[in-house]
Amino acid sequence: MRIPERAQCLSLLDDMDMPEHILAHSELVCQVALLLTDALQAAGVVLNRPLVHASALLHDITKPRSFTTGENHSKSGGEYLTVLGFPEVGDVVRQHVVLDAYFAAEHPSEAEVVNYSDKRVLHDQIVPLDQRMQYILHRYAKTEAHIQMLQKVWAQTAQLELRLFAHLPFGPLQLCDRVDANRCPPDPEGQKFN
Ligand SMILES: [Fe+2]
């Protein structure tokens, strides 16, 4: 399995002229994914950490050009990385919006960790799953069919959250402080989204 190291991932992102805000988002998704990976591994779940690291950093690699081409960036990102010689990374990237299969294996997978981590990071803040899904729904849903698809993804991701945290000694709301307390936006009622 060929997996690009961090420096190579950053160089691949550089090749694509990633805007700063997508780079910041990708870095934070990566931090969340690695924290979850380490915690899951401490609980006995076997995961490939370098695969999570590279896939999380690169998950939006074709997103900037998708704004002009209209391409499906998860699909095209997966293809791009596969053509570059990183098919396993491509496979995880392709599934970062919607997983090929939910809970196909007994234990959580790298694709599940990256998919879930992206759904906890809104821009460069770590937010509750519902807040991120509300944003995705309002920002991207264009048709009734698309709304229904995203609502299904939301429900499946809520199940995924339960599945991941069933292994962990902390809950979804404690994730933010463990990753970076500076990335937890205060909510209007004075409680932190953590
Ligand atoms: Fe994305």
Image (cartoon, rainbow, N blue to C red):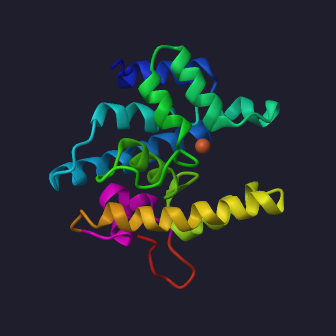
**Residue positioned 34% across, 55% down in the render:** 179
Q: Which residues are magenta?
A: 170-185
> Was residue 173 drawn as part of the magenta stretch in this picture?
yes
| Quadrant of the snapshot with the N terminus | top left
Query: Seen in the image, is 16 located left or right of residue 51?
Result: right
Tell me: residue 149, above or below residue 4: below
Asked whether the viewer can see residue 59, the reply is: no
**Residue positioned 70% across, 37% down in the render:** 72
Q: Quadrant of residue 142?
A: bottom right
Which residue is nearer to you in this view: 35 or 96?
A: 96
Asked whether the viewer can see residue 82, the reply is: yes
> Was residue 43 drawn as part of the magenta stretch in this picture?
no
Tell me: residue 86, above or below residue 185: above
| Quadrant of the snapshot with the C terminus | bottom left
Q: Position of residue 14 (x, y in %)?
A: 56, 21
Tell me: residue 93, above or below residue 122: above
Q: Position of residue 132 (x, y in %)?
A: 58, 62
Q: Quadrant of residue 110?
A: top left
**Residue positioned 65% across, 67% down in the render:** 134
Tally of marks: 0
Q: Position of residue 172 (x, y in %)?
A: 37, 68
Query: Seen in the image, is 19 located left or right of residue 160?
Result: right
Which residue is nearer to you in this view: 160 or 139?
A: 160
Extreme bottom residue here?
Answer: 189
- Where ligand 1 lies, by quadrant? top right
Q: Position of residue 19 (x, y in %)?
A: 64, 33
Tell me: residue 44, above or below residue 51: below
**Residue positioned 35% across, 46% down in the render:** 109
**Dominant SS type (magenta):** helix
